[in-house]
Amino acid sequence: MPKPKGKQRQRTRIFLVDDHPLVLEGLTQCLQQEPGFTVAGHASNSKEALRAIKAAPPDIVIVDIALPGRDGLELIKDLQALQPACRCLVLSMFEEELYGERALRAGAQGYVMKHEPPETLIAAIRQVLAGNLVAGTVIMQRALKWNLRPPEAHALAPEQELTDRELEVYRLIGLGRRRPAIAAQLDISVKTFEAHRANIRRKLGLSSAGALLLRASQFVRESA
Protein backbone atom coordinates (compact mmCIF):
# COMPACT_ATOMS: atom_id res chain seq x y z
CA MET A 1 0.00 0.00 0.00
CA PRO A 2 1.58 3.34 -1.05
CA LYS A 3 2.44 5.78 1.69
CA PRO A 4 0.38 8.99 1.74
CA LYS A 5 2.21 11.94 0.35
CA GLY A 6 3.25 14.64 2.76
CA LYS A 7 1.80 18.09 2.45
CA GLN A 8 3.68 20.01 -0.18
CA ARG A 9 5.18 23.30 0.86
CA GLN A 10 3.32 26.18 -0.73
CA ARG A 11 5.42 28.23 -3.12
CA THR A 12 5.64 32.01 -2.77
CA ARG A 13 3.56 33.66 -5.50
CA ILE A 14 5.32 36.63 -7.12
CA PHE A 15 3.71 39.10 -9.51
CA LEU A 16 5.90 41.25 -11.79
CA VAL A 17 5.06 44.71 -13.14
CA ASP A 18 7.40 46.14 -15.78
CA ASP A 19 6.81 47.52 -19.27
CA HIS A 20 9.96 45.95 -20.76
CA PRO A 21 9.33 42.40 -22.10
CA LEU A 22 13.00 41.44 -21.83
CA VAL A 23 13.08 42.47 -18.17
CA LEU A 24 9.95 40.44 -17.46
CA GLU A 25 11.40 37.41 -19.23
CA GLY A 26 14.71 37.66 -17.40
CA LEU A 27 13.09 38.12 -14.00
CA THR A 28 10.73 35.22 -14.62
CA GLN A 29 13.57 32.87 -15.53
CA CYS A 30 15.63 33.97 -12.54
CA LEU A 31 12.83 33.67 -9.97
CA GLN A 32 11.41 30.41 -11.30
CA GLN A 33 14.79 28.77 -10.63
CA GLU A 34 14.72 29.82 -6.99
CA PRO A 35 13.40 27.14 -4.60
CA GLY A 36 10.03 28.07 -3.13
CA PHE A 37 9.31 30.85 -5.67
CA THR A 38 6.85 30.90 -8.56
CA VAL A 39 5.96 33.79 -10.86
CA ALA A 40 2.17 33.90 -10.70
CA GLY A 41 1.77 36.51 -13.42
CA HIS A 42 2.98 39.77 -14.86
CA ALA A 43 1.69 43.04 -16.31
CA SER A 44 3.12 45.92 -18.29
CA ASN A 45 1.04 48.70 -16.72
CA SER A 46 -0.86 49.56 -13.55
CA LYS A 47 -4.33 48.91 -14.97
CA GLU A 48 -3.44 45.36 -16.03
CA ALA A 49 -1.68 44.72 -12.74
CA LEU A 50 -4.60 45.82 -10.58
CA ARG A 51 -7.04 43.68 -12.56
CA ALA A 52 -4.86 40.56 -12.32
CA ILE A 53 -3.92 41.04 -8.66
CA LYS A 54 -7.54 41.58 -7.66
CA ALA A 55 -8.49 38.30 -9.33
CA ALA A 56 -5.62 36.30 -7.80
CA PRO A 57 -3.69 38.10 -5.03
CA PRO A 58 0.03 37.15 -4.92
CA ASP A 59 2.29 37.14 -1.88
CA ILE A 60 4.54 39.90 -3.21
CA VAL A 61 4.52 42.33 -6.15
CA ILE A 62 7.75 43.51 -7.75
CA VAL A 63 7.10 46.93 -9.28
CA ASP A 64 9.02 49.23 -11.61
CA ILE A 65 8.66 52.98 -11.09
CA ALA A 66 8.46 54.04 -14.75
CA LEU A 67 5.20 52.60 -16.10
CA PRO A 68 2.86 53.90 -18.81
CA GLY A 69 -0.20 55.60 -17.35
CA ARG A 70 -0.18 55.54 -13.55
CA ASP A 71 3.41 55.08 -12.44
CA GLY A 72 4.74 52.55 -9.97
CA LEU A 73 4.31 54.80 -6.95
CA GLU A 74 0.63 55.30 -7.76
CA LEU A 75 0.25 51.56 -8.32
CA ILE A 76 1.71 50.83 -4.88
CA LYS A 77 -0.77 53.22 -3.27
CA ASP A 78 -3.63 51.55 -5.16
CA LEU A 79 -2.43 48.11 -4.08
CA GLN A 80 -2.29 49.17 -0.44
CA ALA A 81 -5.95 50.16 -0.67
CA LEU A 82 -6.97 47.07 -2.66
CA GLN A 83 -4.86 44.37 -0.98
CA PRO A 84 -3.32 45.69 2.28
CA ALA A 85 -1.72 42.31 3.01
CA CYS A 86 0.11 42.22 -0.32
CA ARG A 87 3.76 43.23 -0.03
CA CYS A 88 5.46 45.43 -2.63
CA LEU A 89 9.13 45.61 -3.60
CA VAL A 90 10.36 48.26 -6.04
CA LEU A 91 12.90 47.23 -8.67
CA SER A 92 13.97 50.32 -10.57
CA MET A 93 16.76 51.95 -12.54
CA PHE A 94 16.07 55.27 -10.78
CA GLU A 95 18.43 56.34 -8.04
CA GLU A 96 17.34 55.21 -4.60
CA GLU A 97 18.40 58.54 -3.10
CA LEU A 98 15.42 60.24 -4.76
CA TYR A 99 12.84 57.50 -5.17
CA GLY A 100 13.57 55.16 -2.26
CA GLU A 101 11.89 57.24 0.43
CA ARG A 102 8.96 57.98 -1.87
CA ALA A 103 8.44 54.29 -2.51
CA LEU A 104 8.47 53.48 1.21
CA ARG A 105 6.06 56.33 1.94
CA ALA A 106 3.76 55.02 -0.79
CA GLY A 107 3.62 51.67 1.00
CA ALA A 108 6.43 49.59 -0.48
CA GLN A 109 8.46 47.40 1.83
CA GLY A 110 11.70 47.65 -0.12
CA TYR A 111 13.69 49.22 -2.94
CA VAL A 112 16.31 47.52 -5.13
CA MET A 113 18.22 49.02 -8.04
CA LYS A 114 18.14 47.13 -11.35
CA HIS A 115 21.92 47.08 -11.61
CA GLU A 116 22.17 44.90 -8.49
CA PRO A 117 22.96 41.18 -8.95
CA PRO A 118 20.10 38.62 -8.82
CA GLU A 119 21.25 37.48 -5.37
CA THR A 120 20.46 40.94 -3.97
CA LEU A 121 16.93 40.87 -5.37
CA ILE A 122 16.27 37.36 -4.07
CA ALA A 123 17.58 38.30 -0.63
CA ALA A 124 15.40 41.42 -0.65
CA ILE A 125 12.31 39.37 -1.54
CA ARG A 126 12.96 37.01 1.37
CA GLN A 127 13.52 39.94 3.74
CA VAL A 128 10.24 41.58 2.68
CA LEU A 129 8.36 38.28 3.03
CA ALA A 130 9.79 38.00 6.54
CA GLY A 131 8.26 41.36 7.41
CA ASN A 132 11.40 43.47 7.17
CA LEU A 133 12.00 46.70 5.30
CA VAL A 134 14.71 46.68 2.64
CA ALA A 135 16.56 49.88 1.82
CA GLY A 136 20.09 50.85 0.93
CA THR A 137 22.65 52.39 3.25
CA VAL A 138 22.00 55.87 1.84
CA ILE A 139 18.33 55.77 2.77
CA MET A 140 19.01 54.38 6.23
CA GLN A 141 21.67 57.01 6.91
CA ARG A 142 19.40 59.77 5.64
CA ALA A 143 16.57 58.61 7.88
CA LEU A 144 18.92 58.53 10.88
CA LYS A 145 20.34 61.98 10.15
CA TRP A 146 16.84 63.34 9.59
CA ASN A 147 15.72 62.14 13.02
CA LEU A 148 18.82 63.52 14.73
CA ARG A 149 18.68 66.98 13.13
CA PRO A 150 16.59 69.79 14.65
CA PRO A 151 13.28 70.52 12.83
CA GLU A 152 14.54 73.82 11.42
CA ALA A 153 17.37 71.96 9.64
CA HIS A 154 15.06 69.67 7.67
CA ALA A 155 15.58 71.39 4.33
CA LEU A 156 14.90 69.33 1.20
CA ALA A 157 16.78 69.27 -2.08
CA PRO A 158 14.67 70.98 -4.78
CA GLU A 159 13.55 67.81 -6.60
CA GLN A 160 12.61 66.21 -3.29
CA GLU A 161 10.06 68.95 -2.73
CA LEU A 162 8.08 67.79 -5.76
CA THR A 163 5.07 65.58 -5.16
CA ASP A 164 5.09 62.08 -6.66
CA ARG A 165 2.88 63.23 -9.54
CA GLU A 166 4.97 66.36 -10.14
CA LEU A 167 8.13 64.25 -10.22
CA GLU A 168 6.58 61.98 -12.85
CA VAL A 169 5.57 65.01 -14.98
CA TYR A 170 9.09 66.38 -14.51
CA ARG A 171 10.63 63.10 -15.66
CA LEU A 172 8.43 62.94 -18.76
CA ILE A 173 9.30 66.53 -19.64
CA GLY A 174 12.95 65.55 -19.36
CA LEU A 175 12.36 62.69 -21.78
CA GLY A 176 11.21 65.24 -24.36
CA ARG A 177 7.53 64.26 -24.30
CA ARG A 178 5.11 66.94 -25.48
CA ARG A 179 2.26 68.33 -23.43
CA PRO A 180 -0.63 66.33 -24.99
CA ALA A 181 1.37 63.08 -24.85
CA ILE A 182 2.19 63.56 -21.16
CA ALA A 183 -1.42 64.37 -20.31
CA ALA A 184 -2.62 61.29 -22.19
CA GLN A 185 -0.02 58.99 -20.60
CA LEU A 186 -0.87 60.14 -17.08
CA ASP A 187 -4.61 60.21 -17.82
CA ILE A 188 -4.94 63.86 -16.82
CA SER A 189 -6.21 66.92 -18.66
CA VAL A 190 -3.84 69.35 -20.38
CA LYS A 191 -5.01 71.97 -17.89
CA THR A 192 -3.97 69.74 -14.99
CA PHE A 193 -0.62 69.13 -16.67
CA GLU A 194 -0.07 72.87 -16.97
CA ALA A 195 -0.88 73.30 -13.29
CA HIS A 196 1.70 70.64 -12.38
CA ARG A 197 4.26 72.26 -14.67
CA ALA A 198 3.67 75.67 -13.06
CA ASN A 199 4.13 74.17 -9.59
CA ILE A 200 7.34 72.45 -10.68
CA ARG A 201 8.78 75.67 -12.06
CA ARG A 202 7.87 77.52 -8.86
CA LYS A 203 9.39 74.90 -6.55
CA LEU A 204 12.59 74.66 -8.60
CA GLY A 205 12.88 78.42 -9.06
CA LEU A 206 12.87 78.23 -12.88
CA SER A 207 11.83 81.29 -14.84
CA SER A 208 10.92 79.71 -18.18
CA ALA A 209 9.72 76.54 -19.90
CA GLY A 210 13.12 76.29 -21.59
CA ALA A 211 14.93 76.32 -18.26
CA LEU A 212 12.58 73.62 -17.01
CA LEU A 213 13.22 71.43 -20.05
CA LEU A 214 17.00 71.85 -19.67
CA ARG A 215 16.99 70.93 -15.99
CA ALA A 216 14.53 68.05 -16.45
CA SER A 217 16.66 66.65 -19.29
CA GLN A 218 19.73 66.75 -17.08
CA PHE A 219 17.80 65.04 -14.30
CA VAL A 220 16.79 62.19 -16.64
CA ARG A 221 20.38 61.74 -17.87
CA GLU A 222 21.73 61.60 -14.32
CA SER A 223 19.00 59.16 -13.26
CA ALA A 224 19.63 56.75 -16.14
Image (cartoon, rainbow, N blue to C red):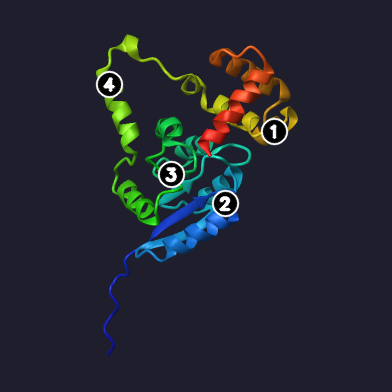
| Figure quadrant of the N terminus | bottom left
Image position of 54 with respect to 102: above or below: below
Q: Which residue occupies the foreground of this view, 126 or 213?
A: 213
Q: Earlier in the sequence, mark 4 or mark 1?
A: 4
The residue that mark 1 highlights is 177
Residue at 63%, 21% (x, y): give it: 212
The mark that comes first in sequence, 4 or 2, is 2
Query: Residue 85, located in which quarter of the rendered image?
Result: top left
| Residue at the disc numbered 4 | 147
The amino acid on which the numbered mark 3 sits, given as a three-letter code, is: Met
Query: Mark 4 and 3 residues: CB-CB less than 8 Å, in contact?
Result: no
* Residue at which label 3 appears: 113
> What's under tag 4, amino acid-wise?
Asn
Q: CA distance from mark 1 to mark 3?
A: 25 Å
Q: Of discs 3 and 2, which sits in the foreground?
A: 3
Q: Secondary structure at mark 3?
A: strand
Labels 1, 2: front one: 1
Distance from Cα at disc 3 to Cα at disc 2: 19 Å
Gap between marks 4 and 2 measured at Cα? 38 Å
Sort mark 4 into few (<14), some (14-19) or many (20+) by Cα contacts within 10 Å.
Answer: few
Q: Secondary structure at mark 2?
A: strand
> Viewer-nearest of labels 4 and 3?
3
State the image coordinates of residue 144 (x, y, percent, origin top left). Answer: 27, 26
Q: Determine whether the residue tagged by mark 1 lies in a helix, strand or loop.
A: loop
Local crowd size for mark 2, using a 10 Å CA cut-off: few (<14), some (14–19), many (≥20): many
Give x and y (percent) for residue 130: 29, 48
